[in-house]
Amino acid sequence: QVQLVESGGGSVHAGGSLRLSCGASGDTGHTYCMGWWRQAPGKEREGVAVVPSDGVTPVYAPSVKGRFTLSKDTARHTLYLQMNDLNVEDSAMYYCAAGGAWCYDWTAINIEEYPYWGRGTQVTVSS
């Protein structure tokens, strides 16, 4: 079992930046992939970025590539998502998740392989 707690959400104007954090506890010794998903009202949950357990070579959704940076502090079991040049379409509840065993190709990321989820942190971007 892995417990995940997100923080860092908030409200910004378009073009602004936010940094999300996700602290993991519990069975952190397992080799899980970890990443961020987001869900806007009335829309399906969509993947944002995922990184293998070693914290190297994250993969990104095309919609955020070049603007968002995913990093992992393996010693502190903490995942970060630096979000720059935010736009209104980035507004959503952002969730941290863990569980996938292989995450080196964005097209192969499957949300059903991630059984552990945090409660989310809200990001609101205004124009």
Image: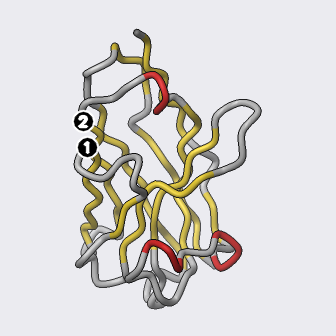
Q: Tell me which numbered mark, 1 or 2, is placed earlier along the sequence.
A: 1
The numbered disc on residue 67 is 1
Question: Given the current orientation, which residue lies at the most extreme top position?
Answer: 127
State the residue at coordinates (30%, 53%). Answer: 65
Q: Tag 1: residue type?
A: Arg
101 and 27: which one is in front? 101
Query: SS of the residue at dot 1?
Result: loop
Residue 123 drawn at (x, y percent) = 48, 29
Quadrant including the C terminus: top left
**Quadrant of residue 42 in the image?**
top right
Q: Is 45 drawn above or below residue 113 in the view shown?
A: above
Q: Is 19 drawn above or below residue 50 in the view shown?
A: above
Question: Given the current orientation, which residue lies at the most extreme right position?
Answer: 42
Q: Is 16 drawn above or below residue 57 in the view shown?
A: above
Residue 17 drawn at (x, y percent) = 26, 29
Residue 38 drawn at (x, y percent) = 56, 46
State the residue at coordinates (64%, 47%). Answer: 119
Query: SS of the residue at dot 2?
Result: loop
Residue 52 drawn at (x, y percent) = 37, 81
State the residue at coordinates (46%, 64%). Answer: 35
Q: Tag 2: residue type?
A: Asn
Q: Which residue position holds label 2?
A: 84
Label 1, residues with CA under 10 Å away: few <14, some 14-19, many ≥20 = few
The numbered disc on residue 46 is none
Q: Is 61 drawn above or below residue 26 in the view shown?
A: above
**Quadrant of residue 59 in the image?**
bottom left
Label 2, residues with CA under 10 Å away: few <14, some 14-19, many ≥20 = some
State the residue at coordinates (39%, 55%). Answer: 62
Quadrant including the N terminus: bottom right
72 and 2: which one is in front? 72
